[in-house]
Amino acid sequence: MDKSVPFILTLGDNYYPDTKRDPDTNKKLKVFDKLSVQSMYECLHNTADIPKIMIMGNHDFKPEKSYVGFEDPCSSINTQLSLIDNDEFVANKLFYVNEDVPDTLFIFMNTNLYDDDEDDLIEYGECMNELYSKLFGISLPKEILSIEDKVIRRRETIEFYREFQETQIKDFCKSSLGIENIFFCGHHPMYGVKTKEKDGKFLLKKQQMNLNGLLFIQDIIDIFYPENSQIKLYYLCADVHLYQKSFIYFDKYPYLPIEQIIVGTGGAKLDKEPLKYADEPFQDKYNIMTTQIIESHSNHGFLLTKRIGPSYISEFISV
């Protein structure tokens, strides 16, 4: 890989479980393959001189109590934590400014805290504690740990880590000067569309971040916009298993586009691209933004983002 690349970014679901059929019940069982996780990190170690920033996805955090042969439901995230070398895998970054391009701010969000599925959101609380303890040096307060009701305890856990993330990032942004470009980076899209087949019919399925996440991104824009109405905004994400480029407009900022690129193309089975998307923009369910999809296709590959003049151009590389 070109040594001029300042860092490599993974956008989550760094591990995706395999499945097999129970020979007695024919039910699907999720199989945790530790060697698969180790091989991925060994591959990344081959570029040891280039920093890696690891964003975690829902499959990294989601507890899987049906893992065959593994009693730890958090096997995925805990195995990854054991393989992360903090000198090489800068997984604990929430923000980053490269000294060679000081006008560009990268914000790395744990978007599992903004999952739009309330049941999944609550589940993630079980497997987040080890990550925040190891990478950020913070632990849940006793008043949360002592909550007996599991659902309430996990909900408070999510809220605690969400407040930590937002406070840290906002404080850094308020002290940042001369920023002309902002890259928001997370696992879940602000808004994404794919085609889902059900009962022989092809239907559009829409995925989006919950309201807390969207308002947080809007709060960050609020910090910079009064000083620079020409600031360029980008959002890099995954989760939907395809490549999709869109322009997203908050109603509050109708002339300030966010260029969103979904790159859920790392290796899992690909989703079908939406059959129809160019006729009119999509309105989110909270009625605070619109999304105009520009390009969408289902190929495995990765994204290469380059600085061209004062802004950035991203190229999808099929593999």
Image (cartoon, helix red, strand yellow):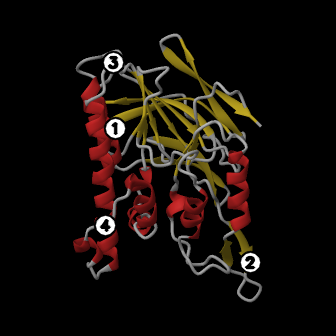
Instruction: Please determine whether, in this image, residue 32 is positioned above or below residue 3.
Output: below
Q: Residue at x 51, y 45 (%)?
A: 90
Give the Cα distance between marks 2 and 3: 56 Å
Q: Residue at x 38, y 67 (%)?
A: 122
The residue wearing badge 1 is: 217
Instruction: Please determine whether, in this image, residue 69 is positioned above or below residue 309.
Output: below
Instruction: Please determine whether, in this image, residue 173 is positioned above or below residue 237.
Output: above
Toward the top, the furthest residue is 309
| Quarter location, residue 278 | top right
First along the sequence among labels 3 and 4: 4
The residue wearing badge 4 is: 140
Q: In screen coordinates, is 105 left or right of 275?
A: left
Q: Tell me whether circle 2 and circle 3 mark residues in contact (CB < 8 Å).
A: no
Name the amino acid, label 1. Ile
Residue 178, label in figure: 3
Q: In screen coordinates, is 187 left or right of 133?
A: right
The residue wearing badge 2 is: 21
